[in-house]
Image (cartoon, grey):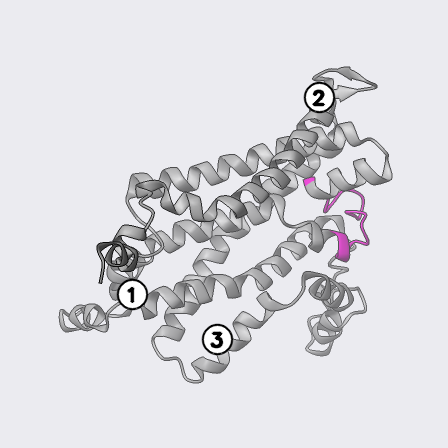
Amino acid sequence: MTSGTVALSDPRRRRLRLGRVEPLVWIAPALAVVVFVFGYSMFQLVRTSLRFEGHWTTDNFRITWSDPTFRTALTHNIRLLIAVPVLVLLSLLLSILLFEGLRGWRFHRWALFLPYVLAIPVIGVVFGQLLQFNGLVNQFLRAVGLGGIAQDWLGQPRWALWTMTAVIVWRELGFGIVLFLARLLSVPSDVFEAGRMDGARFFRLHRRITIPQLSGVIVFYVIVEAITMVSWVFNYVYVMTNGQGGPGDATQVTELYIYQTAFQYQSPEIASAAAVMLFGVTLVLIAIFFRVQRSSGVGLDE
């Protein structure tokens, strides 16, 4: 066998050495497509937000911010953030109960996760029917003698946004439960057994062991749900209010404001300015997540 044959058969000689940049080379094609599609879209969005009747201007942002409807929509998104701690607490409690071996836990896990895999328009249509003044919810309340608290849950400005918040919590809860439960199942059982041998009961055990083990996942879930409440509730509002954000502006959110301004009121410049501002808020939330993750030294795999 010649030396040339040996050189060709040696994989170490034929392998291209790229060092630390090798992962970037492999993902470069997909990354280029993402950068082009997303980058071009963002460029056009910012460009549109800075132009009016063929002239460069920043007045679109001033007009958007001074619009009472936009400020109302932004306020509603902020109020929706109240759902985030509720989601975390409920997800944590239910995942711990399932982890502890609640009777019929397989059925409960399936039942709690099912809403998350349902399409949002389906959920919106179903709850839109259930929560009407003569809907099934109020019929049940009247049947058990609680007719005095029956309301037009989506038709009363006082209750509409909170009702929609409850629907969002019901749907998003399954994601948190599965996320927390998956992390708990990856923790060695010896850790919990040691805590029980030391005399730790239910609340102390999970306060001292479970929550620290879930810290990275909790941070991730908080940021994901905060982004959802700020910029991913359009489908709920559009379907459950027939695209109006009503009654009045009771359920108006920034995404619906952008949609209405661009397509119903034919003002793409104002809509683009609102979209840029919403995108900026989302970027801030993402930056906070990475900052907290880096400073605390926690991650999803911990």
Mark 1: which amino acid? Phe
> Counting other residues with Cα less than 10 Å from the Cα at mark 1, is it few (<14), some (14-19), or many (20 or more)?
few
Q: Nearer the viewer, residue 128 or 254?
A: 254
Q: Amino acid at mark 2?
A: Leu
Image quadrant where residue 5 sits: bottom left
- Evaluate whether residue 11 shows in this view: yes
Q: Circle 2 is placed at which residue position?
A: 50
Label 2, label 1: how far apart the Cα atoms are = 55 Å
Mark 2 and 1 residues: CB-CB less than 8 Å, in contact? no
Which stretch is magenta? Answer: 238-254
Residue of label 3: 109
Q: Nearer the viewer, residue 83 or 284?
A: 284
Question: Mark 2 or mark 1: which comes first in sequence?
Answer: 2
Residue 180: x, y in percent?
40, 63
Mark 3 element type: helix
In this picture, is 180 found above or below 216? below
Q: Amino acid at mark 3?
A: Arg
Whole-percent x, y for residue 117 in the image: 60, 67
Quarter of the view holding residue 7? bottom left
Along the line of sight, the residue nearer the viewer: 149 or 91: 91
Q: Which residue is mark 1?
A: 203
Is residue 294 within the magenta segment?
Answer: no
**For the residue carrying disc 3, how many other residues have a C-alpha within 10 Å: few (<14), some (14-19), or many (20+)?**
some
Q: Is residue 43 above or below residue 218?
A: above
Residue under the point 32% across and 51% down? 15
